[in-house]
Amino acid sequence: MIDVDDVLLLRPVHGFRLARAGRPAVGTVHAPASAVLATIHLRDEEFDDSFADTVPRALACYRTEYAENDFPALPVRTGVHAFVTFSRFDSVEALDAHATPARPGVQVHRLRLSPTPRSLLR
């Protein structure tokens, strides 16, 4: 991990369901043209699982886990209500053109991720 200053403890609403067929061979060095968008939704009240139904294209959805952090060496931010989604796009341009709908009372952070050469998110 590069940065551990802003850690959220999350639980899956529905995690990634990716087929392992077609994974590039070991030694593949060319990264795919696709891009992944991680969207972090924050608000003052708890999210419920049905929020996933309002997020188009989501491959996976996670929300705040309110259990106690049992790994104190990694400080987890508490008192936060988060819903995190991951969506795949065929290109960086397609991701950049995708608008995240505004929702009253919800703060949104978008993170653009690049799949590795052997990623199942190609």
Image (cartoon, rainbow, N blue to C red):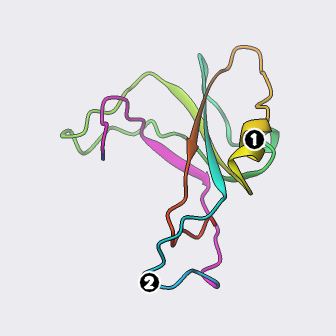
Badge 2 density bin: few <14, some 14–19, many ≥20, Cα 10 Å: few
Which circle's residue, 2 or 1, is located before the other in the chain? 2
Which of the two residues, 66 or 56, is positioned nearer the viewer here? 56
Amino acid type indicated by mark 1: Ser
Report whether 34 appears left or right of 111: right
Against 54, is 59 above or below?
below
Amino acid type indicated by mark 2: Val
Quickly name the residue at label 1: 50
Q: Which mark is residue 26?
A: 2
Which of the two residues, 7 or 99, is positioned nearer the viewer here? 99
Residue 3, image quadrant = top left
Number of the front mark, 2 or 1 = 2
Magenta includes 7?
yes
Query: Residue at the spot x=44%, y=21% of the render?
Result: 79
In percent of width and height, residue 64 lies at 51, 37
Magenta includes 47?
no
Q: Which residues are magenta?
A: 2-21
Report whether 70 appears left or right of 112: left
Disc 2 from disc 1: Cα separation: 39 Å
- Dominant SS of magenta comes to loop
